[in-house]
Image (cartoon, rainbow, N blue to C red):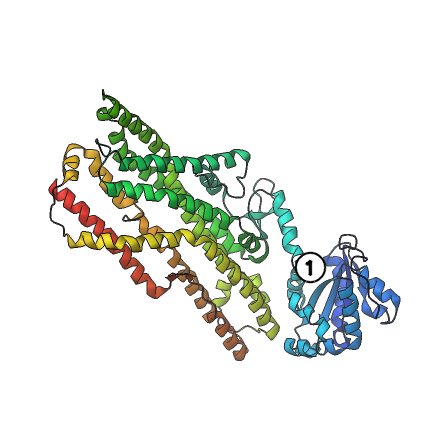
Amino acid sequence: RQRVPFGTTSPFKTASGTFFLCCTPPGRKAIQHLHEALPDRFEGSKVWLDEQHDSSDATLVDAICYSRNVVVFLTAGSTSDPKWQHQMRVAQGARRNFILLGETDEMHGKPSIDELIAKCPTDLKPLFNDNVIIPYFSDPDFRNVTFEKMSRVLAVDPDESFLESKNLAKMRLDLFYKNVTVEDPETEDETVLAVFPRRFIFFCALCGLPLPGSTTTRAKHWARFVQVFIVLCMLLCTTRFFTPEGPGFLDYLSVAQIVALHPVLLLMMFVMMQAVKGKEVRKLVLEEIETSSQANFLCVKLERLTLAAWVLTAVLSVWGWISYLPGFWTSYYLEASNDAYNFLGVLGLLHGIAWLLALPLVFGIVFAVLILSFALQELSYMGLLSAFNELHPEIANKTLQAITKQAAGMSVKEGDLYRFQIRYLRCWELYRMIQWKASLPFLAFWLAQLLLLAWSIWSLVQGFDAVVDDRTLRLRAHWHLSARLTWLIGASPWFGLAGYIIGLLPWGSNFYARKLVNASNHIFFTNTNLRICFMSFIHDFDLEFRILFLQATPWSFLLAFSILVVNTVGYLADVVRLFSSV
């Protein structure tokens, strides 16, 4: 058998735009159509036919070696044909790029995938492991779907397509969908759609979270400053444990809530940046996602959420300033005459200055991370939705939502279901990896909530009757401390309303899981046996957030909500006792 040694053949780049077409006799008619259509579809390409060369002819080896792509048209019995096997071994030895096409018409030799693999020689079986069989449609209305899928795997090994996409990404600073295009309003030309809107990228950059698209030197320096600033603020807030004098201090519990927030912020920033800039997200947007309507709608959602984040950040920051700054910038500290109180005055002044910048940053970071978590969930869902395009060309041309509204069944073949399963599994694995990468802040949050239960239950046992203590005197003397308590009820992630948004976000995955199952239930196949296999496959893959002890299932939602309520009511009981005593 004549083979070409590795590394001695023409590389992909020098053999660009050439195809070698091979098939067995049942596929001759289709291969002739391809021979005529490929030069028109891929401009400048050169096409070789296997029937032009005898299997023992040396020109056959040359034709394969100088072709960038070997297009293998599969029909019933292809893998048992000796001539086909010889051509595959030559192309395999020459390290050519394989494009497998499968006949979809029963009248023209539609193959059984299992039978092809069973009769394939052992040394050629990797062809089916490493390459997806693209359905060939003789109908001109659907043939473009075949060419579109072929264009995505031209002259690449299994990883080169992603590498080429990465090279394309280097030309753009932002993260974008490679397979979703929009019209550029300035040039009126088609361009790929960016994942994150510019307003959201700007908002995250101000919060010290430089997304792809804001990776300038200035943005990186600002992000480092924000991280250092948060550490310094944590150290500054820690000093309040040792300086309980004056109107700037209410109680140790309030100080503990603020101090504990700083390491969680740093954790959220680090983890979310690792997840957003990870290879899993890039694989999704550059290779998998093809749902144009969903991608455009996500941009609209992110724009609206960014506006809401600006408003909430401003409101909560002003509320926080009113609650804290009068206690820091007060004559009690600033007009003190002895050295001890001068030291407290300096601390109060530094606290006030730090809080002017810290509050917008803190709330901005929290909202940015929450929006990014939502965006990652949406991207994962869009990747899974795109896998449904493999079931039928009509799903690719329309949307899955439009198909589910139709009562007619789809003619789905075994090969279609196989391609769907491979792609769905690939997207599901990316989805799980993204969940693991983004899970650490939520695990830390719920661990803290479980630890706080002991104090909250003790507080509830104390009842709601008035209790006079040192805090009562401070509240009577300083109005801003009352405002501080109300601010903590709304803004504290440990006992306040903000904790519900952060803590219950993992349960949002159940919404997408239900949407996907409902869509699957409304897809009808003409082959009922295949539909049973399809539904069984869908139910085999959990889409809920299930990481270690945090099992965000519908049943666990009531337990999680109850924990949050107990902690909130426990803190409210303490606040009510204080206000009653005042």
- Residue 1 location, x and y as percent? 83, 71
Q: Which quadrant would residue 505 be assigned to in this image? A: bottom left
Q: Residues within 10 Å of mark 1 (few under 14, many from 20)?
A: some
Seen in the picture, residue 248 relative to 565 is either above or below; the reply is above
Q: Which residue is pictured at 17% across the width and 36% down the height?
A: 475
Question: In front: 313, or 180?
Answer: 313
Observer-nearest of 493 and 470: 470
Taking the spot 65% from the left edge, 55% from the top edge, the residue there is 161
Q: Can you tell which quarter of the image residue 229 is in?
A: top left
Residue of label 1 = 157
Name the element at disc 1.
loop
- Residue 125 image-quadrant placement: bottom right
Q: Is residue 167 left or right of residue 271?
A: right
Q: Position of residue 369 (x, y in %)?
A: 42, 47
Q: Is residue 209 left or right of residue 475?
A: right
Q: From this viewpoint, is residue 245 visible? A: yes
